[in-house]
Amino acid sequence: MNKVFKNADEAIHDVTDGMTLLLGGFGLCGLPENCITALVKKGVKDLTCISNNAGVDDFGIGLMLKQRQVKKMIASYVGENAEFERQLLSGELEVELIPQGTLATRCMAAGYGMPAIFTPAGIGTEVAIGKEIRNFNGKDYLMEMAFDADFAIVKAWKGDTMGNLIYRATARNFNPVMAMAGKITIVEVEELVEPGELDPDHVHTPGIYVHRIFQGVNYEKRIEQRTTRQHDQKS
Amino acid sequence: MLDKTGIAKRIAKEIKDGYYVNLGIGIPTLVANYIPADMDVVLQSENGLLGMGPFPFEGEEDADLINAGKQTITMLPGSAIFDSAMSFGMIRARKVNLTILGAMEVSENGDIANWKIPGKMVKGMGGAMDLVASAENIIVAMQHVNKAGESKLLPQCTLPLTGVNCVKKIVTELAVLDVLPGGGFKLLERAPGISVKEIKNATAGKLIIEGEIPEMEI
């Protein structure tokens, strides 16, 4: 079993035009920065990207949008990206906005081997159009399908060469559920360690879900909204 | 008339000891500043945190630690981190006691619109659709009228909906109102210096006024 790749370029070598990618992260937090850079460099296009957000103009998925590599974006919130809004309003980019919990749970369903979920999110709204509705105990639920993605590309804090992963703080977000959901899961980590160095009780994603792992480099970890307080302030 | 801080202060009075609370972006975020210190309240941030604390001191920001508004934050003792699926699991399973969020429009039957203005603005619903579809107790914090001077409390929403029949209470710069199960905005309190007539004029939906309406205490 060799899951370890040298770098992002090698880990994503077989991502090709027209594929569907799950990309971890929330805003700019917990993004697979190295893989996004490699995808931009590789220039693959007509991608369907599933990610909670679309980055900002010059960071994250925004970099792929700028190169017109994305045909369709599936996300829950895209408010911070002017280029995204321009491509959306001009019709260049196909966009499907879905509730954040639905996005997470459709990943989870894929990772748990379940074809679909039922959720109340979106009942009575345009999200429900064309979808099956079932009533359980007097309440309506939408049927939403598990994602079927070619690759899941995620970022973890630490991982071992067997693919076991640990995330840090809120950089966890979508990464564990997306890691479970890809036909092939590629993980970049800040620190790659040997088997035995991670406490099995602390592993968030078991290595069985992970196909490729590499030690990332040069993390920028950009902060989207830097908010602070003064020492005499309560909040 | 209340400013944003006033609205946040009034909403803070709805929070009870032991509550798990989800605060939306904007005015709802300010509510955290006015939770009484002797109360045990746990703030949920839907990107995967229970126990959200105040903003960090300058120089102590951590890029891996943000709230759902993407702001740098801190964690309080007793915090817990989880993934996005579990985060919405606890929301859907009604473990979160109170949800406070902003809105562009609320209808007299409790529908809410806050994610899209067709042709103009598409930001997305984020977690709002999940929250309003599942939360038992939803308070909306918003201005009573929009920038064009039109009421945001309507007989029916005109913008694409976020959820239906879900808003329980509204706090604006003018008033506190309950949304009645049978429909209608029941006026509970007036903001300091605001008359019932002014609230009437700013409310397009069915406004229910019974007896004397007290001025709110903040």
Image (tube, coloured by chain):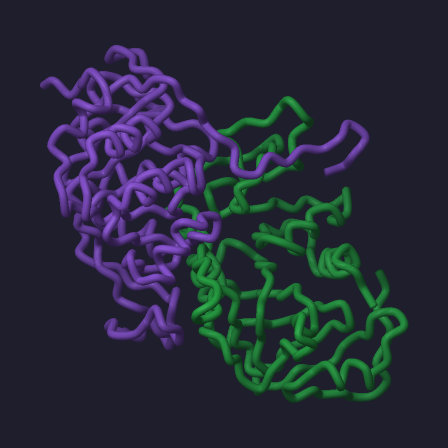
Chain letter tied to purple: A
| Nearer-the-camera pick, A128 or B96 | A128
Query: Looking at the picture, how far across and down is residue B42, in whole percent?
Result: 61, 45
Q: Name the residue rendered at 69%, 83% in the picture.
A: B203
Chain letter tied to green: B
Res A100 visible: no
Q: Examine the rendered structure and indicate whether residue B202 appears above or below residue A218.
A: below
Res A3 visible: yes
Q: Examine the rendered structure and indicate whether residue A214 appears above or below residue B69.
A: above
Q: Quadrant of the C terminus of chain A?
A: top right
| Nearer-the-camera pick, A62 or A2 | A62
Q: Name the residue rendered at 57%, 59% in the picture.
A: B99
Query: Looking at the picture, how far across and down is residue A131, in whole percent?
Result: 25, 71
Query: Looking at the picture, how far across and down is residue B16, in whole percent?
Result: 69, 55
Q: Name the residue rendered at 68%, 74% in the picture.
A: B145
Q: Quadrant of residue B139?
A: bottom right
